[in-house]
Amino acid sequence: MNTYNKVPLSFTKGQGVWLWDDKGNRYLDTIAALAVNILGYNHPALVALMREKVSDLIHVSNLYHIPEQENLAVRLCNISGLGKAFFANSGAEANETAIKLARLYGQQKGFENPKIISMTKGFHGRTMAMVSQYLNNPVSHQFSPLLPGILNVPFNDIEALEKMIVDNREIVAIFMEPIQGEAGVILPQPNYLQQVRQLCNRYDVLLILDEVQTAMGRTGKFFAFEHSQIMPDIVTLAKGLANGLPIGVCLAKNHIADLFKPGFHGSTFGGNPFVCAIADKVLDIIDDQDFLDKVADTGAYLYDQLKQQLGNIGEIKTIRGVGLMIGIEFYEDCKDLQAHALKAGILINIMHQNIVRIVPPLIMTKAECDHLVLKLKAAIQSSCCDVSKIL
Ligand SMILES: Cc1ncc(COP(=O)(O)O)c(C=O)c1O
């Protein structure tokens, strides 16, 4: 179906942060299959484990105990400090789980029409409940009627959030990304997430953080919420957790998770032994302080280099980010840049016509950062910018 505007390119192999197309051209990948391939391509430990596991057991149903799943749940609960896990196959499904839990929580409080506040320009996936979160997005309204009980406030506007809670009855949860990824890497203002947490405490509202894109070390900490020293009530994960195999997880505090009873929720494929074993191996590598520190260090280096090398280009409005999640915002449409970047041998993702999002594999080295900055500068020089301003 006609759901993507595809780049006329296909890949035949990958290694580390590099991909090769069917003509043998090599590209440095700053997209990582949309922030998924956190350990890059052809990671030896993952490939070896997959070979071993595939002849073991790929799939059994959730009608039975799945030790790999139970082990992964315990690990993720220990890392997050939350109580229980539900396994799905994608970010949107993990978020659906969170929304169902929030509604149960509302019912428990006697709410007839529990309402969820989500953020303008947030992104949580493409299922009906998720497109219903984006009240200002015209695409959402193609699928009317949307799920009721959703309110939106702008990200980073704590007054608007408090007013929304006070002015509306039966608010049950705030549902948000700690850093807005698809909006173009929009960072929370200092203390914003702490203030959101305080509002949740004050008004007995659940804080649901969608860490589908930001967790698994992307920002230099396992979860982005750790930068704000807050604790959410529910967290959702997906993308990089199994380095390219489909997985989604909803983690919740015990008293919320326990609202589910058998039959309330489920998934045919979610939490199967194969995917969970691979995710467990991913955790062996990324749930490590040295690994996370290295992501933070490489991210800071890349950010500095981008600032130094591209900071004086008049067409660039801002460069922002944390860890290996960086956005370069242009004043004007820069979508031509993509073709120039391809010629320069780098894969970049342009969002909203004017923001380059950089979410490479977390194993990127500083030498690869240097290569990226050099090639990106060359691509910018040959596309939209006045060369005299760059030299
Ligand atoms: C923050 C966030 N939540 C949810 C999703 C949806 O994930 P999926 O495409 O796996 O359903 C995405 C995808 O980009 C995302 O960035």
Image (spheres, rainbow, N blue to C red):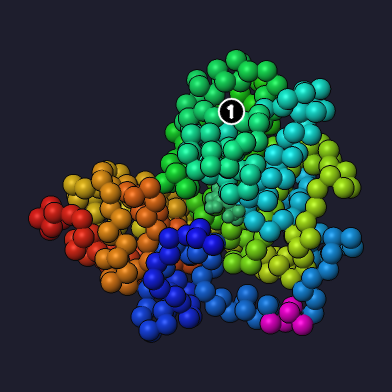
Q: Is residue 292 left or right of residue 274?
A: left
Q: Is mark 1 within 8 Å of ligand 1?
A: no
Say if 172 sits above or below 369 in the image.
above
Residue occupying image coordinates x 79% and y 60%: 268
Main secondary structure along the magenta-highlighted residues = helix
Quarter of the image that includes the N terminus = bottom right
Residue occupying image coordinates x 34% and y 50%: 353
The image position of residue 69, as x and y in percent, is: 78, 61
Q: Is residue 72 left or right of residue 348?
A: right
Say if 16 sits above or below 374 in the image.
below
In this view of the protein, can residue 187 be seen by the observer?
yes
In this view of the protein, can residue 282 be seen by the observer?
no
Q: Is residue 86 left or right of residue 329?
A: right
Residue 170 occupies which quadrant of the picture?
Answer: top right
The magenta segment is: 51-55
Residue 11 on the magenta span: no
Task: Characterize the local packing of mark 1: few (<14), some (14-19) or many (20 or more) Cα atoms within 10 angstroms.
Answer: many
Residue that carries the numbered disc 1 in the rendered image: 151
Residue occupying image coordinates x 50% and y 51%: 219
Q: Amino acid at mark 1?
A: Leu
